[in-house]
Structures are given as C-alpha cells and as structure tokens.
Image (spheres, helix red, strand yellow):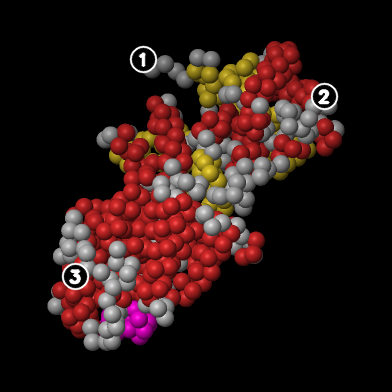
Amino acid sequence: MTEKTLRRLAAIVSADVAGYSRLMGRDEAGTLRRLNAHRSEHIDPLIAKHGGRIVKTTGDGLLLEFPSVVAASECVVAVQEGMATRNSGIGDDDAICFRIGVHLGDVIVESDDIFGDGVNISARLQEICDTGCVTISSNAHDSVEGRIEAEFVDGGDRELKNIERSVRVWQWAPSAFDAEVPTVINAPLPLPDKPSIAVLPFDNMSGDPEQEFFADGMTEDIITLLSSVPDLFVIARNSTFAYKGQSPDVRKVAADLGVRYVLEGSVRKAGNRIRVTAQFIDAESGNHIWADRYDRVLDDIFAVQDEVTQGIAGALQSRLLMAEASFLSRKPPGALDAWGNVVRAKTLLQNYRRQDIDEAEPFAKRSTNLDPNYAIGHAVSAYILAWRSYNGWTDDFKTTASESLRHGEQALHHGPNDPTVLADVGFACWWLGRFRQARPLLQRAIELNPNAALANAMHGYATAAFGETEKGIEFCELAFRLSPRDPIEYMFWWLLAASRQFHRDYEGAKEAAERSINLNSTMISAQLVLAGACVRLNDIGRAKAVLEQVRQSSDTAIPFIFRAGSEGTLWHEYTNPIREVYDGPLPEQQGNQ
C-alpha cells in the first residue's frame, strides 16, 4: 500500500544574508564568527519564542516553518529591527544584513523537511526583498493585517521566477531604514579589466535527488573549462555555489561578485531522457545574450554530462566576443584599453571583407601600442595582416606578410601557452603558406582549449590538407556541436567544404560551400571551393559563373589562391580545379614568404 503524502498549511520563512559572497571573500573567518553570534544571541531565540522551527540552513540562508503566519511575521520583523540595532556603529564592510520572505501556503512534509510551491514562493519573495526588509505574499498579508503593529506597503503584482502565476507582494521596512542599513551592500565591486563571468549552480528541476549530482557536476565542469581560457575572469566554484538552492537576481549576483556576465541553467529528467537549458546573461542590462537547450538520452550519464558541458562552454566562448563588443561599443575608441581594442578588431573581422580588414587594423595597432608585450594584440595583428597579404589587399604583399610574421613571433614569445594566441598565429601562418608551421600551432591550441569551435574547424581543415581527411572532417564537424548556430557558422561550413574537397567528396564540398555562402554571400573562400567542386562534378558553366561573380566583387580575390605554398599533400586538389577554368589575370610571382 502506497504511503499517503502528508501535507499541511504553514507559514514559511526564507531568509538570506545580502552580499554574503562579498563578505566571505573579504573575511571568511570573521563573517562566520559574526553570523554565528547573531544566530545564537538574537535570531534563534526569537524563532523559539514565536513557536517556529529551523527546517534547514544553507550557509547564508535559513528556511523556517511557523504554525501561525502572525507569529512568523512578528518574529521576522523583530529579527530585522534587532539586526538594524546590532549593525549600528559597525563599518559598512562588516555589517551583516538579511532579506526575508514570508508566505502562507500548503507544504509537503517528508521527515523533518518541507517541499512544494509554498517553499518556492517564500524563497522567491526573499530574492526580491530589499536588504534589511521583509516581503510577504498577499496570502500572508490577509492573515496579519490588523493583527500586528508592523505596517506593510503594497508592492503590487510581481512575476516570480519559475512560479507560473503572479503574486501580490507587501513589504515592511524599518522606520530608520535609509539611515541604518549600510548602502555598501548593494554597491557593485569594480569589474576586472577583462571579461568576467559567474556560473551559477544549475537548478535540478526534476525532483529527483540523484540528478542533483549531475547538475552540480556539470556546473563545476563548465567553471573548469571556462577557467582554462586565459583572457576570461571566472568566479570560483565556492563563491557561486553559495547561491545553490536559490534563484537570485542576476544583477545582484553580478554586483556581489564583481562580474559582467552570468550563466545560469537547469536540468530536468523524465524517464531516460534529460533536458538541460542554459542562459548567458548580460548582468548590466539583464538581457539574454544566448540561450539553448540540450535534449539527450541517458544511455551513459557521464558521456551526456561531458557532451553538454563542452557544448555550453564552446557556445559561450563564441558569444563572449560579441557580448564584449556590445559592451565596449558604448565607449569612445580613445577610452579603450588593449583588450578593448582587440575586441573591436576581432568583431570587425566577422565578414572577412577588405573593408573589414581596413577598419580592424587600426584597433589592432592601438592594442600593441598601448601594451607592446600584449600577446593577443600581436596575434590579432598577425591574423589581420596575413589575411590582407593572402588576398593581395596591399601594394606589397611580401612586406605585409613579413610584418604579419613579426607580430606572430612577438605573440608566441609573450603568450606561448595561450590557446587564443596559438590559434590566431596558426591561422596567420596558414594563410601565409607556412603550412608546416601552422599545423602544430593549431593542434596545440585545441589541446589547451578543446572547446574553441573555430580553432577546431581550422585545425580540421589543416589536418585534411595534409592528407588525414577523415580525421580533419571530424574536427570540422565538432565545431558545429561545440557551438550550434554560431555567429560565424559560415566559417565552419567553408572549412568543412574545403576538407571534403581534399577528401574528394565533391558533392559534400559543394553542399557545405553553398551553406556557407547562404549564411554569408561575401565569403569568397567558400565561393572558390564551390567553383572547384563544380569543376570536379563537370558543371563547368556554374564554376565559371561563380568565378566571374568573385572577380566582379574583388579585383584580387582569385589570384590569391595561386599564391599559397604547396606543402599540403592535397593542396592542389583545392587549387587545380580553379586553375582549369580560370581565365583572368594571374599573380606576378609565387610565394608569400
């Protein structure tokens, strides 16, 4: 016989310490000592006096249950009034202040624990509560109005996270609120001089306690993977897991931890399937930069965890540059630091056109002028100048190539183990015809950061060009799994098209090239692969039409393909089909070195 679920009506109180992570980061031992003193001398005696019980504690938080909402409200108001007194005369950096939510609702009782919507709503009320105040639901307010001395102000209907219906809320604040509550609690920490992110613990939405380990493990793995990216400031696990079991406002999290971006998500299991959702948020505006969901069959839970974790980390890296560009676009060029100039340069390269190169190059130069030892600044300069030389968008492509190599050497000197530097310099060497130098750089880049989507695709292209075509195609296809619907997905398709051409899969090369062109009609490299594939498929008319379209769009776009070196064992599989039907001007001399 199935045991009947035990339910009861209760007043539920959720409380937490505002700015707890900031306090712990500043003085862990002192914060714990002061918090324990507040509990033992002030809070716990008031809970017992009003007939409440402590259901559980969560580091900085308390979940309480009272048989009467009147008793619960009187208790928490007394707690907040007492805390205002206890904090008087204490420096703002040391003051401990609470946010408290109260709700009257149905709860499910299991042993000494309670669950259900009533608990969830009280937690959400606490999250929207002002520091030093008490926020209660309309259910609770209806029961206490006229029965206690404390006065609550109508806060209107509010949408609470993961609560389907809106909830009318009321708030109590101490009479001396403005004067007594330290304002530093809500003051944001200064942002680091590079992108900064906090990965919040993923919510377990399945109701299955076993999935808690899956959600926590995935969160920890994402933090670890992102921490391997050199120019990214990632908050440590211990700080972000202080928010576990909560749904905090991302703006408050960002202010508490001093970050620009927040990643949050959830895990939901049904049968042998699991759904993971993730949202990447600009904490300053509250806008979603990127969101996706991953539906998987749980044949191997660890394999699924690895796959989804890698996908989230890969997608996040691709979107981060765009997010930074949006943030930095609000600054005048003269106010940008070395990193800001690199971001502007890289985002201007999104379409790889001549005008993009012309606009990006000054930002790259400014980054190395501001910091001559800045590895990524030199790497992006090498990248830009190599693409300029490769395309012939210069009066002297050899001098431009030499300048690119000089920047590449500086980048590798100052950042020999930076995967972004290795990838950018690897790209540059490839475009300059230094294939044997490029390939190990690209290989090392993905060893250090295996979730960088574009680096995997470029490494796949290089691998295929050296004859390992099946392996190269696998790396190219991995890029799509790492970052689905990437802003530069057209680059993935071009590199896959070229790799398939090396593999002599001309139908596959044609299809991938067409998909690249559909995403970016100005992608000349993809048009050249398409022309070559059409020659091999004996569609000479279309090949010539594509080449004529390219020639009309750029006076030097076609000859660059003959200027590259010939170290790759299958390189001529890429160039010869174009030579067979091209009847335009040829370059004056071979070699870019």
Q: Which residues are magenta?
A: 545-557
The reply to whether residue 468 is in sight is yes
Residue assigned mark 1:
1
Badge 3 element: helix
Helix, strand or loop at label 1? It is loop
**Within the magenta stretch, is there residue 555?**
yes
CA distance separating discs 3 and 1: 75 Å
Callout 2 touching callout 3 (CB < 8 Å)? no
Callout 1, which amino acid? Met
Residue 423 image position (x, y, % from top left): 38, 55
Hey, what amino acid is under mark 2? Thr
- Distance of mark 1 from mark 2, alpha carbons? 54 Å
Residue marked by disc 2: 85
Residue 278 in the image: state x and y as whole percent: 46, 45
Are dots 1 and 2 in contact, CB under 8 Å? no
Give the residue number, with chain letter if any, for mark 3: 572
Residue 589 or 31: which is nearer the viewer? 589
The quadrant of the image that shows the C terminus is bottom left
